[in-house]
Amino acid sequence: MLQLNMQPPEKPVMQEDGSLEVHSVFLTVQGEGPFTGCASIFIRLAGCNLECASCDTDYTSRRELLTPRQIMAHVKLLCPERIPVLFVLTGGEPFRQNIGPLIEFLLMRSLQVQIETNGTLWPKSLDYHDDLFIVCSPKTPNIHPNIARNATVFKYVLDAEHVDPNDGLPTESVGSRYRPYRPWASRVVIPEIYVQTLAEQDRLKNKRNLEACIEACLKYDYRLSCQLHKIIGVE
């Protein structure tokens, strides 16, 4: 059975000085999507504007209001000798907060920024950025027009019980009960599409979910995301 996500949705909050409600900052190996296998600093921001029933990520149990400089101070404690080039802003939902100042802070230091988003929000502080790597994992039928235009990659969580036979993508995602957005709804050139299995507390269901992802990849030329971090036992 799936564990039910009880973390309530939260409204956007924009601190003018760029301070962010941070759940955690940690060094890890990116386990999903196009940077799989890369050493990276994860900045997990607290809170999300959605409440997906089977989300398996803790993003509300703790939070601390930190400025970009304070976040980097945490990073330097984690990596006193060498800071990885890749920074991943995740959540929760990063676009729920004013991440513009943090992104400016990182890009000025020649660091690469990947943002993981559900695609429903877009902070105005990012209007003039075209050097971000945005991974959108849609959970709703529609996403923000700026995400639709600018997302580099789309990633879908797939389970065997909810696969659209016409495109191999989910008819609903992580228990949201909505058919998630498809990139060809507004893009002429389709970006890379990744599929990854819904993790359930049932070995046979997980096997079927993986088989559904593999079938979708073979039939539609999607890419398989296997959550490497869980396989190797890191956060």
Image (spheres, grey):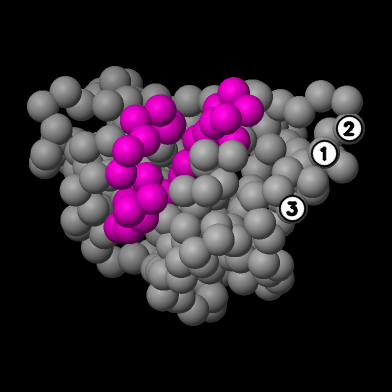
Q: Which of marks 3 and 1 is nearer the N terminus?
A: 3
The residue at 40%/28% (across/down) is 131
- The kind of residue tagged 2 is Pro
Above or below for 136 versus 177:
above
Q: Residue 195: in sight, yes or no?
A: no
Residue 99, horizontal then vertical, whole percent: 50, 52
The residue at 41%/38% (across/down) is 135
Q: Which of marks 2 and 3 is nearer the N terminus?
A: 3
The span shown in magenta is 106-133
- The kind of residue tagged 3 is Gln
Q: Callout 3: few (<14), some (14-19), or many (20+) C-alpha neighbours within 10 Å?
A: few
The residue nearer to you, when weighing 103 against 154, is: 103
Residue 155, horizontal then vertical, whole percent: 38, 39
The answer to whether the residues at label 2 and label 3 have Cβ atoms under 8 Å apart is: no
Gap between marks 3 and 1, in whole Å?
10 Å
Q: Residue 145: in sight, yes or no?
A: yes
Q: In this view, does 53 lie to the left or right of 20?
A: left
Q: Which label belongs to residue 70? A: 3
**For the residues carrying marks 3 and 1, which lies nearer the camera in this image?**
3
Q: What element carries label 3?
A: helix
Above or below for 153 versus 42:
above
The residue nearer to you, when weighing 199 against 133, is: 133
- Give the residue at mark 2: 80
The residue at 61%/65% (across/down) is 21
The answer to whether the residues at label 1 and label 2 have Cβ atoms under 8 Å apart is: yes
Q: Which label belongs to residue 208? A: none
- Give the residue at mark 1: 76
Q: In this view, does 127 lie to the left or right of 39?
A: left
Residue 96 is covered by the magenta coloring:
no
**For the residues carrying marks 2 and 3, which lies nearer the camera in this image?**
3
Q: What element carries label 1?
A: helix
